[in-house]
């Protein structure tokens, strides 16, 4: 879920007509000082992280003068809290609070509607208060077609025990909060505390919005870099992986790193699952063997071979892993040879030297296992393919044996070298890459097997050379499914004339950085 | 009998001319699903594997007669309108295969479904299959495999993981145990028919003698199944597996979530609740066939 920082959430609330303290985000002590000078009142400094309980971590501090703000900001910026290094703080006016409330919006999976919750007590530990004083909490299932009506909001506040002007102000705020959440596709929205100040005004003193990952495409204005559920900022490699996913809607590719730096002597492997349920089961199996996972990766929902290829390249950008474990549900509906071909291209390019166990059970698993066996047998490391009747536990045990036989050798990351393609090569663009054929090599080809290997049947022979049988435009729009079958056939059985370039922006530079240490 | 779909159900495919729509139309048709029409706006007059294509659901209904079920294969951003279109035309069951559908779109679909007395499976579902009768969605991938992997029988299968829907059913078949209907309820936080709703359907179904359920952490589906059992609204034996044991328990994203759900949603709570009401919770999906055999004796 794409979380927004407090200062971003407050900006959206403010635009939606909700009163928030005057203030601004600062990335340096100097900036913090400028903000404080502008406010010209005592202020509060708040570190911007996706964590609760910031006060206890020293992440919330007060200051009376711009000078003091600058000093405190200097301490707070760069602070390490849990998974974070603080790189921004919010500087805002200090409120004179007389009462604290709570407002939250969540998705109710049983009623299938947004649920608005209001509590006449707020602040830290609101869950506990809710348990002890249920009468102070009220909730309302919002009619998603009509939105939250003001009278509904008034009843919601009234039922939590409030009345009069405060009730009216709060009801107005709740209606606005719902609108802000709806307009920005927030799947959760929370104001805690929601406060009443000494001058009898309601403010959103803290606020957190979580934007629906699946709706981020509707909101480029929010500048969300990686629409994924993280409790820390994404790593560089995660950002690279996400860019692949962002531009290719065929199937799903999810990549999450458990560690960015594998500690010496620890048994880490690269993990490549397919489907949530099967991945969980498969992870349990390798964890039971005493391995640790460098990453979690999932390619599912019938991804093309090109996407599986990119996933494998990303996984193999992690130095120090000792093995590669790919395993899904075991009985996949998708044609498993696509995944097999993706891995073949990636493993061959990497000249893989750590063992891989690939459990590709499902449709056409026999073909998938044959592809792995036929095209990867000359690699320095062993790659073994298994099917639906081989359990994850069995496959994890196989990997353990192979890693031991490989003397626990560690994976080393190699630089990405672009293939040399002659200037006069025949080429066409695919949805996410470019396919080129060096026709000068074709006369030596006896089989012309690339045409037969092509799954979508979009190649034909013209003067004994393979060319597109459809328009270039159709190929680019996805009629070329990037199944990689032609390249693999030509590379292994014929003249090495075909090359499919599938760029992964940023990966080359990332690997260079790793190689430099 | 089976639940939700059999060989007589009249089925429409929305997005039939797309990459997934075409591939899965072939699977469904080959398996024996009674596909009466397809819809892709602007493509009326074409046909896909002999299935006539129309511009709208309404047109398909006019030309082909009443439609019981629509299976949707179109890009996520357009799904809401397609679902509303199908329901407006009178379709009472939707199978929404695509994933990444914005949550408010799902809520709007749910709202309209309730108002119109319609139901939906998904989103983010592999679909459902009644062995020997019909398949909706993409379970099995190819008809030949679907026939080999799934056999008619007495066990209902419901799962929050697509792959595990097939895997559990396949391992049951290998153990000589057939299935009444197997259903992937969908992987999202909000789904149309969730586990408890599917349980109520299995309860009513004569063919189903027992249910195998693949649960996962998050949402309240498994707890609500336990509530049903406790209220004697589901009385058949239930074998359950809950995935996500290794995940950090008690991860909470908001105070509001904690207020609404309390400790619901965690692995521990789900397993505890299911065991309390007499469900058979197993630690590995490979134990499901064993347990089923034991219970059938």
Image (cartoon, coloured by chain):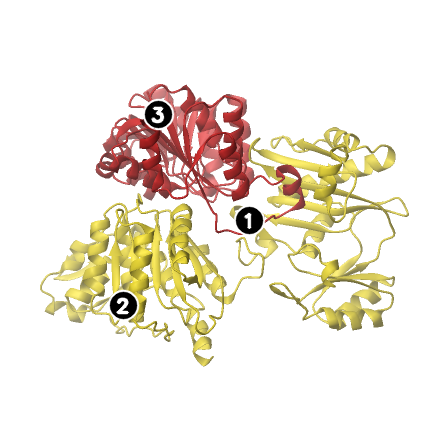
Q: Which labelled disc corresponds to residue A369?
A: none
Is residue B284 at all visible to an observer of this figure?
A: yes
Q: Chain of mark 3?
A: B
Residue carrying label 3: B5
Identify whether A247 is placed above or below A514.
Answer: above
Q: Using the rendered image, report if marks 3 and 1 lie on a common chain.
A: yes
Query: Which is more toward the observer, A93 or B144?
Result: B144
- For the point 74% across and 63% down, the residue is A58
Q: Chain of mark 1?
A: B
Number of other residues with Cα within 10 Å of mark 1, as a class: few under 14, some 14 to 19, many 20 or more: some
Q: Chain of mark 2?
A: A
Query: Which is more toward the observer, A46 or A266?
Result: A266
Q: Colour of chain A?
A: yellow
Which quadrant of the view contains residue A501?
bottom left
Residue B12 point in image, percent of width and height: 35, 28
Query: Which is more toward the observer, B246 or A95?
Result: B246
Number of other residues with Cα within 10 Å of mark 2, as a class: few under 14, some 14 to 19, many 20 or more: some
Residue B276 point in image, percent of width and height: 52, 32
Alpha carbon distance from label 3 to label 1: 37 Å
For discs 2 and 1, the disc positioned in front in the rendered view: 1
Residue carrying label 1: B249
Would residue B230 appear left or right of B181 to someone viewing this image?
Answer: right
Look at the numbered disc 3 and give the secondary structure of its residue.
loop
- For the point 65% across and 49% down, the residue is A209
Residue carrying label 2: A348
Number of other residues with Cα within 10 Å of mark 3, as a class: few under 14, some 14 to 19, many 20 or more: many
- For the point 33% across and 52% down, the residue is A392
- The red one among the chains is B
């Amino acid at each position: 879920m794409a979380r927004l920082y407090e200062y971003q959430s407050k900006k959206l609330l403010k635009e939606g007509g909700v009163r928030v303290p005057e203030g601004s985000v600062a990335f340096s002590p100097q900036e913090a000082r400028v903000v404080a000078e502008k406010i010209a009142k005592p202020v509060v400094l708040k570190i911007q992280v996706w964590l609760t309980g910031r006060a206890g971590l020293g992440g919330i501090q007060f200051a009376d003068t711009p000078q003091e703000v600058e000093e405190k900001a200097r301490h707070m910026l760069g602070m390490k809290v849990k998974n974070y290094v603080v790189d921004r703080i919010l500087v805002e006016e200090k409120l004179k609070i007389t009462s604290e409330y709570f407002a939250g919006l969540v998705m109710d999976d049983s009623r299938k509607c947004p649920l608005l919750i209001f509590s006449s007590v707020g602040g830290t530990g609101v869950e506990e208060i809710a348990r002890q004083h249920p009468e102070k909490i009220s909730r309302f299932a919002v009619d998603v077609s009509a939105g939250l009506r003001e009278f509904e909001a008034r009843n919601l506040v009234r039922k939590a025990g409030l009345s009069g002007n405060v009730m009216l102000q709060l009801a107005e705020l709740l209606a606005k909060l719902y609108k802000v959440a709806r307009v920005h596709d927030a799947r959760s929205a929370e104001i805690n505390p929601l406060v009443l100040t000494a001058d009898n005004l309601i403010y959103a003193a803290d606020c957190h919005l979580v934007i629906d990952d699946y709706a981020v495409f509707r909101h480029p204005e929010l500048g969300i870099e990686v629409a994924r559920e993280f409790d820390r900022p994404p790593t560089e490699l995660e950002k690279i992986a996400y860019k692949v996913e962002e531009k290719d809607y065929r199937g799903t590719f999810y990549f999450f790193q458990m560690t960015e730096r594998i500690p010496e002597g620890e048994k880490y492997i690269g993990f490549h699952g397919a489907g949530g349920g099967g991945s969980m089961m498969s992870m349990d199996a390798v964890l039971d063997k005493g391995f640790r996972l460098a990453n979690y990766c999932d390619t599912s929902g019938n991804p093309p071979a090109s996407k599986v290829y990119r996933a494998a390249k990303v996984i193999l950008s992690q130095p120090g892993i000792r093995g590669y474990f790919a395993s899904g549900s075991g009985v996949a509906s998708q044609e498993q040879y696509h995944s097999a071909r993706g891995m073949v291209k990636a493993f061959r390019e990497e000249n893989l030297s750590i063992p891989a166990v690939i459990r590709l059970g499902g449709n056409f698993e026999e073909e998938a296992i044959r592809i792995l066996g036929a095209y990867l047998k000359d690699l320095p490391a062993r790659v073994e393919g298994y099917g639906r009747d081989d359990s994850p536990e069995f496959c994890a045990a196989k990997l353990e044996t192979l890693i031991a036989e490989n003397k626990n050798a560690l994976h080393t990351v190699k630089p990405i070298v672009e293939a040399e393609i002659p200037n006069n090569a025949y080429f066409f663009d695919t949805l996410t890459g470019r396919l080129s054929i060096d026709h000068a090599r074709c006369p030596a080809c006896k089989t012309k097997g690339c045409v037969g290997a092509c799954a979508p049947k979009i190649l034909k022979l013209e003067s004994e050379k393979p060319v597109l049988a459809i328009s270039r435009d159709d190929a680019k729009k996805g009629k070329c499914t990037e199944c990689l079958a032609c390249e693999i056939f030509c590379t292994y059985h014929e003249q090495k004339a075909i090359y499919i370039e599938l760029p992964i922006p940023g990966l080359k530079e990332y690997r260079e950085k790793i190689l430099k240490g | 009998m089976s639940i939700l779909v059999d060989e007589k159900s009249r089925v429409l495919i929305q997005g039939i001319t797309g990459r997934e729509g075409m591939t899965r139309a072939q699977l469904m048709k080959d398996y024996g699903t009674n596909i009466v029409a397809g819809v892709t706006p602007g493509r009326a007059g074409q046909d896909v594997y002999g299935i006539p294509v129309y511009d709208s659901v309404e047109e398909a209904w006019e030309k082909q007669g009443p439609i019981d079920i629509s299976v949707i294969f179109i890009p996520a951003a357009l799904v809401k309108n397609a679902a509303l279109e199908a329901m407006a035309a009178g379709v009472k069951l939707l199978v929404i295969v695509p994933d990444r559908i914005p949550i408010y779109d799902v809520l709007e679909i749910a709202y309209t479904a309730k108002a119109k007395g319609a139901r939906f499976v998904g989103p983010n579902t592999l679909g459902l299959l009644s062995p020997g009768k019909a398949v909706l969605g993409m379970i099995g991938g190819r008809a030949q495999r679907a026939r080999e992997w799934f056999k008619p029988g007495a066990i209902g299968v419901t799962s929050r993981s697509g792959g595990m829907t097939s895997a559990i059913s396949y391992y049951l078949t290998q153990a000589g145990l057939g299935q009444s209907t197997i259903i992937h309820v969908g992987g999202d936080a909000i789904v149309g028919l969730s586990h408890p709703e599917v349980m109520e359907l299995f309860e009513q179904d004569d063919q189903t003698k027992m249910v195998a359920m693949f649960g996962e952490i998050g949402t309240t589906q498994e707890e609500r199944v336990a509530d049903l059992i406790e209220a004697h609204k589901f009385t058949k034996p239930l074998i359950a597996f809950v995935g996500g044991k290794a995940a950090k328990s008690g991860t909470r994203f908001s105070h509001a979530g904690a207020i609404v759900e309390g400790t619901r949603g965690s692995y521990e709570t789900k397993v505890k609740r299911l065991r309390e009401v007499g469900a058979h919770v197993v630690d590995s999906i490979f134990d499901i066939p064993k347990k089923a055999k034991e219970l059938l004796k």
